[in-house]
Image (cartoon, helix red, strand yellow):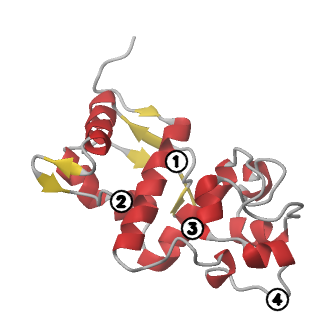
Amino acid sequence: PYEVSDIKQLFSVSKTFTSIAIGKAIDNGLLNIHDKVIKFFPCNNPSEYLSKMEIFHLITMTTGHDHCVMPDIASSNPIEAFLKLDIPYEPGTKFVYNTGASLILSIIINIVTGMSVDDYLKDVYDALGITNHFYESINGVSLGGVGLHLNIDGMLAFGKMLLNEGVVDGKQIISKE
């Protein structure tokens, strides 16, 4: 019942697009993989482990949480909810598949670029010929870990770009790194 041109929600494949946005922001000098998360979300008296959490830990899902925090933070104020969460393990010491970490990465993209992940990747979509797509959002922020809707041709073009280390039609679209 589906056509190749139909757009479908990609669920966790969305995380790959958010990661590419983070890499692009790093390449553009907007952030560093070892920036502390609280640099972007200043708070009074952060816990020891929250103070140690880096963008690297969000990307690798080693934030120190003991569960996926998405249900806890998918609210009208995900930043406030995230900052209040208990972090039982030192960041970098425990992996937990954590869609909420990708939402926080998406919020960071919004902070450093003034754009949603979807808007920030416009040049990548254009280079790949992707015209029919959208990210579900909360208050204008792409969900990051879920919510990207795209068709199979777009997915194939994106995958081919990754296999070609960021090169599309002989042009470096995203850095190899």
Disc 2 target residue: 177
Q: Residue 138 placed where, x, y %?
A: 59, 59
**Mark 4 → mark 1, Cα distance in angstroms:** 30 Å
Q: Dot 3, crowdedness within 10 Å: few (<14), some or many (≥20)?
A: many
**Quarter location, residue 175:** bottom left
Residue 44, which numbered label? 4
Q: Which residue lies furthest to the front in this view?
A: 93
**Mark 1 → mark 2, Cα distance in angstroms:** 17 Å
- For badge 4, the amino acid type reads Asn
Residue placed at 36% from the left, 59% from the top? 177
Q: Residue 97 placed where, x, y %?
A: 70, 44
Q: Residue 2 placed where, x, y %?
A: 37, 16
77 left or right of 150? right
Dot 1 or dot 3, earlier in sequence: 1
Q: What element carries label 3?
A: helix
Dot 1 or dot 2, earlier in sequence: 1
Residue 15, which numbered label? 1
Q: State yes or no: discs 1 and 2 in contact (Cβ < 8 Å).
A: no
**Mark 2 → mark 3, Cα distance in angstroms:** 22 Å
Work out whether residue 71 or residue 38 is closer to the camera in this orientation and state it. Answer: 38
Disc 3 target residue: 107
Q: Which residue lies furthest to the top in this view?
A: 1
Q: Which of marks 2 and 3 is in front?
A: 2
